[in-house]
């Protein structure tokens, strides 16, 4: 197993997370488990963010890495086939 670790200085965490979320919006939501009915509890939202901003940065980076691995596998599969020219078709 390989472990990839990136270190962000403590003084920069808030800034970097804020910058990352600015361009990669943390807008995934889930049903609020405390939500009952908007008429009786209007101050409790029906949906809440699924991730905190720090959790979202981690999740988004993991998704990007998985996407790149899938793209690499597809490219290897595609490139493993020899090109067949149409010149030999009679």
Image (cartoon, helix red, strand yellow):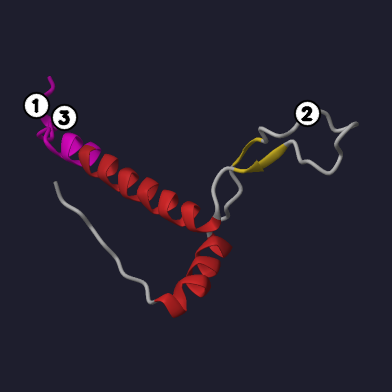
Q: Position of residue 59 (x, y in %)?
A: 43, 49
Q: Position of residue 5 (x, y in %)?
A: 26, 62
| Distance CA(mark 2)–CA(mark 3) | 65 Å
Left or right side of 26 for 88: left
Above or below: residue 49 compared with residue 74: below
Counting every numbered tag in the picture gives: 3
The residue at 44%/51% (across/down) is 60
Q: What residue span does the magenta drawing correspond to?
A: 74-90
Residue sitting at the far right: 39
Vertically, is 88 above or below 49? Answer: above
The reply to whether discs 3 and 1 touch (Cβ–Cβ < 8 Å) is yes
Q: Is residue 18 left or right of residue 39?
A: left
User: Left or right of 10: which side holds 77?
Assistant: left
Helix, strand or loop at mark 2: loop
Q: Which residue is mark 3?
A: 86
Badge 1 density bin: few <14, some 14–19, many ≥20, Cα 10 Å: few
Q: Residue furthest top?
A: 90
- Spatial distance from mark 3 to mark 1, Cα to Cα? 5 Å
Residue found 9% across the figure and 34% down from its top: 82
Residue designated by label 1: 88
Q: Quadrant of residue 44?
A: top right
Q: CA distance from mark 1 to mark 2?
A: 70 Å
Indicate yes or no whether the magenta region holds residue 61: no
Question: Which residue lies under the disc numbered 2?
Answer: 36
Q: For the residue carrying disc 3, how many other residues have a C-alpha within 10 Å: few (<14), some (14-19), or many (20+)?
A: few
- Mark 2 neighbour density, 10 Å: few (under 14) some (14–19) many (20 or more): few
Q: Nearer the viewer, mark 1 or mark 2?
A: 2
Query: Residue at horizontal 36%, vertical 49%?
Result: 62
């Amino acid at each position: 197993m390989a472990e990839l670790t990136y270190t962000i200085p403590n003084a920069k965490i808030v800034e970097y997370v804020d910058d990352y979320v600015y361009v990669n919006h943390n807008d995934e939501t889930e049903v609020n488990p405390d939500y009952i009915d908007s008429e009786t509890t209007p101050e409790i939202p029906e949906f809440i963010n699924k991730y905190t901003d720090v959790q979202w940065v981690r999740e988004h980076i993991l998704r990007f890495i998985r996407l790149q691995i899938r793209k690499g596998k597809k490219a290897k599969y595609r490139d493993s086939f020899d090109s067949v020219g149409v010149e030999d078709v009679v």
